[in-house]
Image: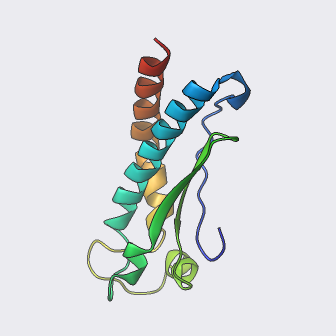
Amino acid sequence: MKDGIDVDLDLHINPAAFNEETKTAAARVLKDAALHVLQVSNTRVPLQEGHLQTSGDTAVDRDEMRAYVSYSQPYAIAQHEELDWKHAPGREAKYLEKALEEEAPAVQAMLAQQLKELFT
C-alpha cells in the first residue's frame, strides 16, 4: 500500500488448489474477514475530522489469496505508530494492529466456517 498501513494475517490457503469458482468464493470470504477487521479498527481510529476513518479500505489478491486492510491518509502511519500522542477516549495508536490481533481468533473461526461451507 502506498501511504497506508498493511497488516497481514497469513491463513495458509493454497491458491493452486482452487478452481475459478472456488477462488471467487474464497476471495469473498477473505473480503468479509478484512471488512470485519476494518470495522473494528474504525472504532479505534483517532478522530479529529474523520478523514482517517473514512480512508480505510480493504482489498483481496485473488492470485495469492491474501486480504489487506489499509488507511490511505498520509498521516495514517504516524497516527498508528506514535504511542505518545493523545487521543479521545476509546481512540488509540496501533488501531489496526490491535484490531487484527484481538480479532484474529474470530476472523479465523469465521473463515474456517465459511470455507467449510464452501467445500462441503
15 lies left or right of 47? right
**Which residue: 42% across, 44% down?**
32
Q: Where is residue 93 in the image (x, y as percent from the top left)?
A: 45, 74
Could you say which is closer to the camera, residue 113 or residue 57? Answer: 57
- Image quadrant where one finds the C terminus: top left
Up-down relation of residue 103 to residue 86 (above or below)? above
Q: Position of residue 47 (x, y in %)?
A: 33, 82
Report which quarter residue 46 is drawn in.
Answer: bottom left
Could you say which is closer to the camera, residue 43 or residue 68? Answer: 68
Q: Residue furthest left?
A: 89
- Image quadrant where one finds the N terminus: bottom right
Q: How is the image coloured?
A: rainbow
Up-down relation of residue 12 to residue 50 (above or below)? above
Number of marks drawn = 0
Q: Residue furthest front?
A: 20
**Which residue: 61% across, 51% down?**
8
Q: Position of residue 82 (x, y in %)?
A: 53, 81
Report which quarter residue 88 is drawn in.
Answer: bottom left
**Which residue: 48% across, 25% down?**
115
11 lies left or right of 44? right
**Which residue: 69% across, 41% down?**
64
Q: Where is residue 116 in the image (x, y as percent from the top left)?
A: 46, 19
Q: Residue furthest right?
A: 16
